[in-house]
Image (tube, grey):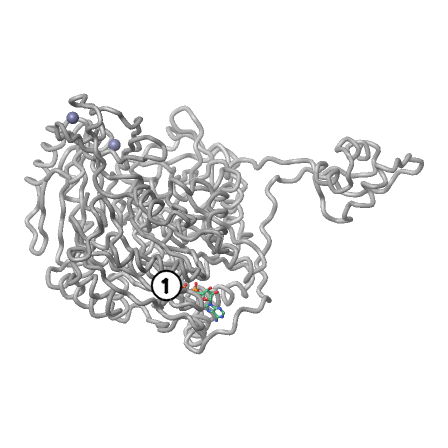
Amino acid sequence: MDQAALNFGEPEKGAGRVRVLLPLPLKGPLDYSLPEGMDVPPPGTLVRVPLSGRMAVGVVWPEKEAPRGKTLPLNKLKPVESCIDLPPVSTDLMKFVDWVASYSLSSQGAVLRMCLSVPAALGDVPVKTHYLKDHVPAGLRLTPARQAVLDSMPSDVPQTASVIADRAGVSAGVVQGLAKAGALKAVELSVDQPFSPPDLSIDGPNLSSEQAAAASIIRDQVWQGGFQPYLLDGITGSGKTEVYFEGLIEALKEPGTQVLVLVPEIALTAQWLKRFEARFGTRPVVWHSDIGLAQRRRAWRAVASGEARVVVGARSALFLPFKNLAFITVDEEHDPSFKQEEGVLYHARDMAIVRAKVADCPIVLASATPSLETLVNADDGKYRKLVLRERFGSAVLPDMQAVDMRTSAPAAGDWISPPLTKAMKDTLHAGEQVMLFLNRRGYAPLTLCRTCGHRIECPNCTAWLVEHRFKKELHCHQCGFMRPAPETCPECKSEDALVACGPGVERLFEEVTREFSDARIAVMTSDTMTNPRATAAMVEQIACGHLDIVIGTQIVTKGYHFPSLTLVGVIDADLGLRGGDLRAGERTYQQLVQVAGRAGRAERPGRVYLQTYEPEHPVVQALLTGDGETFMQAERQSRERYAMPPFGQLAALVLSGPVLTDVLEQGRRLAAAAPAIQGVQFMGPAHAPLSRIRGLHRVRMLVHSQKRTGLQRIMQSWLRAIPPVKGVKIKIDIDPYSFL
Ligand code: ADP
Ligand code: ZN
Ligand code: ZN
């Protein structure tokens, strides 16, 4: 970990010397010399430099601080090899990297690595021969095939031989023959086709008056420019997307601007993209973990050159090299997936605010269930709040009821209560669709031996193996370990003694198939929706009414709009509340509102059944009464009372390593070295709830500060004082969301 450079001093400008930040977790930028004849490259220039025997690409970094330690004399420095022919990285992006590094206590290089995540984009883009019409040389024999090529070719758009041949219905050889004869001109062009710009002239829908009011405030702000966050707080189906689209359009009217829409990865569905395309006449540039390398390279370069006007992406899109960012939207801002839990740990919603601040542009955080963090900022006047209270058109919010599982228990071994079964029957009878929500993949979360009591666990983690019956396997959801499902107990070898405990979606599928033998049933999880095409096919099937019952995990909670879906059954409303951390109530509330929001999105009203053992729990009550505000107020008060985030601040340390005693010893040393500071409490070390993952032992420490500022500085000097122990890794998590 780096002590993210915060010591400013007199810059030491040596002639012929340049500082280069490499996308590696080093202490800071490195010094290089400039070869004879090379002009001093301005900050932001991408350069190729030697690094321990190989070439690496880095960025010429601004010299705002004096180099640490002693500087090498110029003649000891390795020279820059060359400058890369790409637009320089913007000053904004460099500021953003520095900011994220010092906030998250990561090295600048580790943050830069997220910006330069596509090495292929930094090299030469492959080219392919394209052809254009030229003058047909006098006397050239034009066969019918050749004539067909000339007739079908556009006059000014270069195309590849295969495209031309396809169009003319001839072989590619004919095209090449014509080129050889001089009738076509060959040009070498990049294989990356340009992205077409959004069409801003397409008419949008007529906005309702509350939509129009919100849109006009956002449009005015975008027109005026300048940093200003907005919270767009609107119930599910109120048309938040239509409203922020108006902000996008306003920003794009200015030539050369770029806009970014951040969405949780699972919300970026084909349905969403179609809707975008209908409004803008083209696809946006899409950025998430699942796009292929060629797409990635093309997108990165298009963002860097400014050609990409609209980027829609998951959290990592924040680190793209935008040239001229004019507007940001974070949709579903409350979503837990915005927190990055590996590598550099950051919260994309918070960093999006920083990105907007650096770019000096407006930002909209949209949600039906805003996070407490954002609500508090809005109450404090830092964010301006825009509210949409109505569902669009005739759609109304679904009717919610709780099923008390203590009095309406399902039959032994079943999971669906009698009232929910009845509601399902009625819904199917009316020709409408049902969704059952259970956030558990697989068949059962635990496999137990009835004879000896053995629980089948992952060999690498403190986690039970989850049975996946469709695949006849047991999986670890922590590390991905898999094994065939055993016939006999691995411990006592008893036959027929293994029993599945608890429900997963596959088990629910079994029950539904048995109870509703005529119904057409789909299971939507990350196990069944393995690629975009399979997903799109399934979604299409549901949307046009070819399926009756959808059983899904959280993957179904966002981004889908199924007009005939009128009943949602939540199988275990209490699931997210068990073993709860500080946000368990808030998160469960948000998730269940989202699931409920799938019901009754069109003309027909929806109903939601919440199966619960605690109908009087505040979360369940908030859902039933629809009074989320009171619930969030209560959450706010309890967090404020204990100075929990967003009032105070937390930082977690996760120590991990192969030898438990080493890990614990390092934790004890850290605890012993903890400074005594008023209002700051150091807790731990303690075994993490997930005490082993992938064979590494895990120990946690937690730092709690009553105040929201200054924690990084305290952490830095504390951690600097303790020398590292070989084999023990320390992960720093500022503003932790996971406590496992
Ligand atoms: P939210 O993002 O708030 O959940 P959406 O923007 O997805 O809401 O809108 C819900 C549905 O209502 C979508 O199908 C959308 O196309 C439709 N809709 C919203 N506003 C309008 C409008 N002004 N005119 C026509 N359709 C609208
Ligand atoms: Zn056994
Ligand atoms: Zn495991």
Give x and y (percent) for residue 453: 13, 31
| Circle 1: residue type | Ala
The answer to which image quadrant residue 344 occupies is top left
Ligand 2 is found in the corner quadrant, namely: top left
Residue 83 seen: no
Judging depth in this view, the residue of 18 and 111 nearest the camera is: 111
The quarter of the picture where the N terminus appears is top left
Task: Residue lying at the far top in this picture: please name it.
Answer: 493
Q: Is residue 114 above or below residue 420?
A: above
Left or right of 255, for residue 715:
left
Judging depth in this view, the residue of 277 and 649 nearest the camera is: 277
Task: Residue lying at the far right in this picture: please name it.
Answer: 139
Q: Is mark 1 within 8 Å of ligand 1?
A: yes
- Estimate how packed mark 1 is, as few (under 14), some (14 to 19) or many (20 or more) residues with alpha carbons within 10 Å: many
Give x and y (percent) for residue 707: 15, 59
Left or right of 201, for residue 411:
left
Give x and y (percent) for residue 523: 38, 45
Q: Residue at x 10, y 28 (%)?
A: 661
Q: Is residue 172 above or below residue 557?
A: above
Judging depth in this view, the residue of 286 and 441 nearest the camera is: 441
Q: Residue at x 46, y 53 (%)?
A: 542
